[in-house]
Amino acid sequence: MKRQRLGENTGGITQVTGVEFILFAPFITVVMLCFLLVSVSAILYSILKVKSLMIPF
């Protein structure tokens, strides 16, 4: 019996189909945008916090 390698299905098709791409591309994009937004807002918050500490009110 031939062993099946990882990433090989029975049909031998390992390429991502159009449907899978259409389903997963928006999800990945949304996750990346959320991560980017959170990181940018955290950086801006820390910069503004440091600046507000430096400027005496």
Image (cartoon, rainbow, N blue to C red):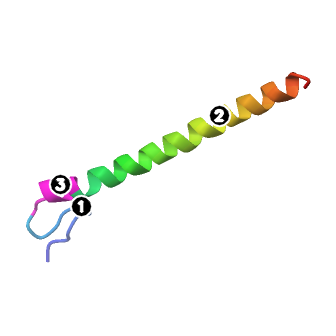
Q: Which residues are magenta?
A: 12-22
User: What residue appears at the point 72 percent right and 34 percent down from the top-left corner?
Assistant: 46
SS class of the residue under badge 2? helix
Residue picked out by circle 1: 7
User: What residue appears at the point 86 percent right and 23 percent down from the top-left corner?
Assistant: 54
In the displayed structure, 41 sits above or below 24; it is above
In the displayed structure, 51 sits above or below 20; it is above
Q: Quadrant of residue 41?
A: top right
Q: Residue furthest front?
A: 57
Q: Residues within 10 Å of mark 2 (few under 14, many from 20)?
A: few
Query: How far is the residue under mark 3 from the one under mark 1?
Result: 12 Å
Quick one: 14 or 54, which is closer to the camera? 54
Q: Is residue 15 magenta?
A: yes
Instruction: Name which of mark 3 and mark 2 comes first in the sequence.
Output: 3
**Res. 17 in view:** no
Residue picked out by circle 2: 43
Residue picked out by circle 3: 16
* Residue 37 appears left or right of 31: right
Q: Position of residue 40 (x, y in %)?
A: 57, 35
Q: Nearer the viewer, mark 3 or mark 2?
A: 2
* Residue 13 appears left or right of 52: left
Image quadrant in which the C terminus is located: top right
Q: Which mark is residue 41?
A: none
Q: Position of residue 23 (x, y in %)?
A: 24, 58
* Residue 31 appears left or right of 44: left
Q: Residues within 10 Å of mark 1 (few under 14, many from 20)?
A: few
SS class of the residue under badge 1? loop
